[in-house]
Amino acid sequence: MDLILVRHGESSANAEGRLQGQRDYPLTRRGRAQAQALAAWSERIGLGWDAAYCSPLSRAKETAEIIAQSRTSSPPAAVTDLMEFDAGALQGLLHYQIRERFPEFFDRALSEYADYSRWGGESYDDIAERVRRVRGFLEARHRKSADRVLVVGHGGFGTEVVKHLVCEPAPRSFNVKFGNCTAILVRMSERFQTYVGQVLWQVPVEHMQDSVGQ
């Protein structure tokens, strides 16, 4: 099973410097252009997929629809568990507002990444459980048939998905650059009696835009 994991294009909150979490923000014009570049690039290199899923938040859903337009017979299916982290009271705030109201957010240890419980959001364990559900959902539908699957979501949650797919056991912290409309291909296979992933490639949208002349 191959998973093409994509982060949504630039949203209005990205452009403003807001922490989005599970609040819904639309794509900007630039974000739509990024999604179109990814669509053109994937078609140019012959990158296809057998099924497509996305977060129900509009920035991911619209990105997925742009990418998949004319490539599949049905639109990407929205999966609630693919939503971004619930960041609690931090959601919707500009970075300077977070620094003023919740300065401890910037003083936390790296091991506290992906844990928003102290601000009323999801805990690390909550997020890890969601990742397990997403993995189980995809494996149940696509592992046996060795499908290639497009999954369009978010930077934070997407990073956690990649981490749990390729690391066994998964470390608490994991650093990977997952910019807007970056695409990461993870190939799942049996290795030493463990079904685990390998990152085959990671392509930022800037490379895609150069490739298709945008």
Image (cartoon, rainbow, N blue to C red):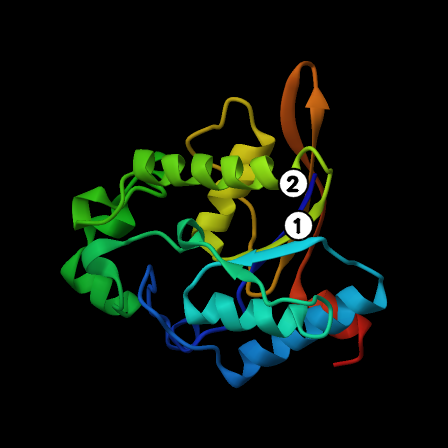
Q: Quadrant of residue 183?
A: bottom right
Q: Quadrant of the C terminus?
A: bottom right
N-terminal of the pair, mark 2 or mark 1, is 2
Q: Is residue 106 left or right of residue 7?
A: left
The residue at the point 64 percent across, 25 percent down is 195
Horizontal side, residue 75 vs residue 123: left or right? right
Percent from the top left, x then y, of residue 108?
A: 28, 42
**Please, what secondary structure does the residue beneath circle 1 have?**
strand
* Residues at circles 2 and 1 in contact by the CB criterion of under 8 Å: yes
Picture layout, residue 199 above or below residue 60: above
In the current view of this chain or complex, which residue is farthest to the front?
73
Q: Which residue is identified by label 2?
A: 142
Quarter location, residue 91: bottom left
Task: Mark 2: give few (<14), some (14-19) or many (20+) Cα within 10 Å.
Answer: some
> Which mark is nearer the camera, 2 or 1?
2
Is residue 72 toward the left or the right of residue 110 in the image? right
Q: Amino acid at mark 2?
A: His
Residue 10: image location, x then y, percent: 50, 73
Query: Is 43 situated above or below 113?
Result: below
Q: Position of residue 123 (x, y in %)?
A: 27, 39
Instruction: Give the answer, above or below, for where 176 lies relative to 136.
Output: below
Numbered circles on residues, count: 2
Q: Going 60% across and 32% down the picture, which residue do you hit? A: 166
Looking at the rendered image, the quarter that the N terminus falls into is top right
Per the image, the residue denoted by label 1 is 149
Disc assigned to residue 205: none
Residue at the spot x=72%, y=38% of the render?
145
Task: Indicate the amino acid at tag 1.
Answer: Val
Helix, strand or loop at label 2? It is: helix
Q: CA distance from mark 2 to mark 1?
A: 8 Å
Q: Quadrant of residue 198?
A: top right
